[in-house]
Image: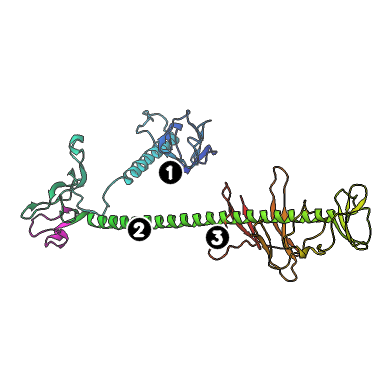
Amino acid sequence: MTVSTTTRKKSYTGNGSTNIFAYDFRIFSDSDLKVYVDSVLKSLTTHYTVSGAGAASGGNVTFTLGNTPASSKSVVLLRTLPRTQATDYVDNSALSATSLEDTADKNLMLIQEIDAVAGEGFGFAETVVDAGTTTVNKNAADRANKLLSFDAAGGLIATQEIGVSRGNWAASTAYIQRDIIKDTDNNNIYLCIVAHTSSGAVPISSNTDVAKWVLLVDAASATTSATAAATSATASATSATASATSATAAATSATAGATSATASATSATAAASSATAAAASADAFDDLYLGSKSGDVSVDNDGDALTAGDLYFNTSANNLRVWNGSAWQVAAVSTSGMLTEISEDTSPQLGGDLDTNSRNILIDDAHFIADDSGNEYIIFQKTASAINQIDVTNAAADNDPSITATGGDSNVGLTIAAKGTGVVQITTTMNPTLTSTGKALVLGF
């Protein structure tokens, strides 16, 4: 049969699952096909099997179980024929056309193979007429640590080192090709390309013989770049340090502000508790002193049973009466000079808790609740037509009391403000976070 293609190689990339790879050229036996996975030669029958030997259209290589090429691995199928001739033609025997053609086909395939190998190697173009020496005549020991290059006649040699180090450049020194020197002015490394006797001085870049040298290592530029990089790194580090310092100061300020807010909230809670206690005391007083009545009564102002010590002022008899536990009796005091309004007493005192009896305590604008020395605990400021206020709620065991903004609006914030340059402190043993939500300031711990 004819040989209509020069193809002798197929290449693929494995995906970890495909184990059958096709080839589309003729081989004579399974062993004529070499299989490589990632440039590693695999073994016939051990790693793979071949089908289609003798067929002009080729066949398949099937990898055995456990030898499927992994993902991204290269797979190369390469026809490599033995350099032998196994057909024996006997005198006066029948000459088989198939046998003769197979021999011719194999020889042509071997020529293709040799041509492919030669074409993939180093060589000269067919148009080159002066290739010179194209073989190296040195043994391995003589070729060791040498470069493959061309001599002065253009012949292939392997006798030149990269260059010969001559140390620091010096004036009045004979240099030849491939001498290597160091410029002591800037540490640059140069290779001599024209033999000459040196003159002048370094740097070589401004020397009259500069054209006779080629720069191998630009140490001067590297040093400049390194210095610039170090300067930039130092500046960046300084900037980072400054930023860290600013961040630390900001965090410290935030912590102080949170501490102040906690302290203010604590004071507000105490003041609200005092107001609640005062309201309770007022209610208790209302139950103790029933006020002015035209005659004896059988229940207190809340409709509850009388208790011993209850008082009221009898406007008909114009005297103060006390309940002794079973009957009203006139208190042993004269009504002359007695108070008819609490406002007439500039320092009134309660004998027990004041119970507001589900009533409110009304406080004039800008008036306050004070301690027993007359110092303000809390001052109440009045806003016309106010609909929003503060709720102060106590708590049972294992729960937290609260100060809550509430009122007629859907969204009500809570303002805690310091005076002048003072700060709002919130004191806690945990780290607070401040979150702004709508109009509200949320203090989370």
**How many other residues sit within 10 Å of disc 3, few (<14), some (14-19) or many (≥20)?**
some
What residue is at 44 percent from the left and 40 percent from the top? 76
Q: Is residue 240 above or below residue 101?
A: below
- What residue type is disc 1 on? Val
Q: Which residue is mark 3?
A: 423
The residue under label 2 is which amino acid type? Answer: Ala
Element at badge 3?
loop
SS class of the residue under badge 1?
Answer: loop
Q: Which mark is residue 424?
A: none
Q: CA distance from mark 3 to mark 1?
A: 98 Å
Q: Nearer the viewer, mark 3 or mark 2?
A: 3
Q: Is 231 displayed left or right of 400 in the figure?
A: left
Mark 1: few/some/many CA within 10 Å (<14, 14-19, 20+): some
Percent position of residue 387, x then y: 75, 66
Residue drawn where x is 16% and y is 48% of the image: 151
Q: Relative to 184, does residue 134 appear above or below in the rendering?
A: above
Residue 202 picture quarter: bottom left
Q: Which residue is mark 2?
A: 235
Residue at mark 1: 3
Residue lying at the far bottom in this picture: please name it: 384
Q: Is residue 86 above or below residue 10?
A: above
Q: Answer whether labels 3 and 1 touch (C-beta < 8 Å).
A: no
Label count reads: 3
Q: Nearer the viewer, residue 313 or 250?
A: 313
| Whole-percent x, y for residue 171 in the image | 7, 55
Q: Please indicate whether residue 367 sits to the left or right of residue 150 in the image.
A: right
Residue 191 at x, y = what percent? 17, 52
Can residue 300 be seen here? The reply is yes
* Mark 2, secondary structure of its residue: helix
Where, by quadrant of the figure, is residue 294 drawn?
bottom right
Q: Earlier in the sequence, mark 3 or mark 2?
A: 2
Amino acid type indicated by mark 3: Val
